[in-house]
Image (tube, coloured by chain):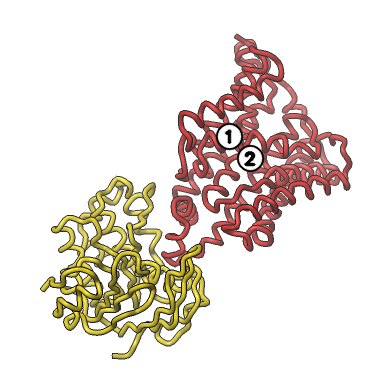
Chain colours: A red, B yellow
Amino acid sequence: MSTFILLTITGLGLGAMYFLIASGLSLIYGLMGVLNFAHGAFLTVGAYATWWTSTHVGGGPGTKLLVGAIVGLAVGALLAALVELVLIRPLYERHIEQVLVTVGLALVLSALVEAIWGFDARQFPVPDWLIDTTTIFGANIPNDRFLEIATAVLVFLGLTAFLRYTRYGLIVRAGVENRAMVTALGIDVRKSFTLVFAIGGLAAALAGVLSGVYFGAVDPGRGTSLLIFAFIVVVIGGFGSIGGTAIAAVVVGLVQQYANYYASSGLGDLAVVLLLALVLLARPGGLAPKVAH
Amino acid sequence: MPALISVSDLHVHLGESHVLQGVSFEVPEGGVTALLGRNGVGKTTTLRALMGLVPRRGRVTLAGAELTRLPTHRIVQRGVGYVPEDRDVFAGLSVDENLRIAERNGSPRYELVYELFPELKTRGAQKAGTLSGGQQQMVAIARALLNENSVLLVDEPTKGLAPLLVTEVAAALERAAELATVLLVEQNLAVVARVAQQVVVLDGGRVVHAGGAKELLGDPERVRALLGVHGGGH
């Protein structure tokens, strides 16, 4: 029982990170039709900005992490907005070119991080209370899992409130359905593109910070490895749907953990791909296709 | 009457197809000008080109100001409302949200909209995707009427509607024409006869006739020759 609880909460923690990356990917594709292969790089850059800042500020690990995370999130959001303005905007509706540019950018940013800070993993400032465990029904759960889950829940609620109660949210939801009609109502939908990219970059950087806490370190390949699962989450959840993305992220995180433990170590990734195939066979548009909600 | 919209040598290529091949016409200020023609002659494409929704070449002016270089949202902000073919309501948004997103300034004309289409008020919370075709058309027209526009481009608003709803939409168009100049694409000649003063006829991507609505619709031979249908509607 205690193992099952540990696996479940760890799976939810992993799912929380997938959700943070996938929510931005999903909204960006749903609204703009852009498959952003550089999204993982936003995570990596955000995580490295957090680590770098933490090494340049005083105080304990908690302060270092907090200050570093604020800088990391700002860097992630700014980088994403800049990428949208400079690289993506001239290429709207040119999908092949977008893929080439975002793949190229991912490679460049990854190489840049490696060139500056090397291939070795860098240790993240993690306060002791996050490393400590809390016992739930006999299972010793590392506290960082709760932080990851709580953060993802807050981001989910924040994104849902943004989409439901703000004018920009209304524009994004309408734009996911029919971008041309939004412009035909006199709305400069490109402003929403930049905003959604910035939100996506911020959420990815947040995933970078939490992955640093989860793994205790950050390395140049982190974004790319998590991006693959985030894409699977987006496809299962349905492009453009935050609710679908949240459900899919939880399912993927849990399936991965359960399969790795109960079947065979390393089988978790295969189980996720099988899950993707099953969902695509049953519901080709994903769980909640093409409607932002 | 002075021309409010002037279209000159408008060309549109969609893929391999040269859909508009130098369309030129003028829309006088006030009333309704109907854009007519057989299926596939480029009526919808003309409206989409005026809106900047398809790549186009040529010259389009609104009250003397060039529109061709402006993106779609800027054209709309100049006072152009658009009711697209097939309505294009946002299915996942409620009726209220469909109207709210169309607001362009601080004083949207909800009174007018609800006077014309009282049903929209009672169905405010309903998802637009669950409305009937006629109700969706009301939403589409209401979005355009919500703001003070000098021009409304309306594309086949009665397409697929029951006769009772056609009458309701025609009444809304008449009211709209009191508030703005309307350029109307319409296949239903009875509606054209009721609301339009001017007609422009397209064929093969070009204008083949322009003049008064009464003159054309009163000449069945001409209607048959230009539109391939029996005239009437009076």
Along the line of sight, the residue nearer the viewer: A25 or A271: A271
Q: Give the side of residue A80 with respect to residue A33, left or right.
A: right
Image position of B88 (left or right of B113): right
Report the label total: 2
Figure check: A73 above or below A148: below
Kindly tell me whether residue A179 is visible in this rendering.
yes
Q: What kind of element bears circle 2?
A: helix
Given contact means CB atoms under 8 Å apart, are the residues at marks 1 and 2 in contact?
A: yes
Q: Residues within 10 Å of mark 1 (few under 14, many from 20)?
A: many
Q: Is residue A72 left or right of residue B101?
A: right
Could you tell me if residue B107 is visible in this image?
Answer: no
- Quarter of the image containing the C terminus of chain B? bottom left
Q: In the figure, A262 relative to B128: above or below?
A: above
Q: Position of residue B170 (x, y in %)?
A: 19, 67
In the rendering, at what x and y percent does residue A46 appear?
Answer: 73, 45
Front residue of this view, candidates B169 and A247: B169
Amino acid type at image mark 1: Val
Q: Which residue is mark 1?
A: A233
Pointer 2: what residue? A21
Taking the spot 60% from the left edge, 44% from the top edge, the residue there is A25
Q: CA distance from mark 1 to mark 2?
A: 9 Å
Position of residue B151 measured from the top left corner of the image (x, y, whole percent)? 34, 76
User: Any mark on residue A38, and which?
Assistant: none
Which chain is indicated by disc 2? A
Residue A108 against residue A151 in the figure, above or below? below
Q: Earlier in the sequence, mark 1 or mark 2?
A: 2
Q: Point out residue A64 in the picture as x, y percentages from the top left corner.
A: 79, 40
> Which is nearer the eye, A237 or A192?
A237
**Residue farthest to the bottom?**
B1
Q: Secondary structure at mark 1?
A: helix
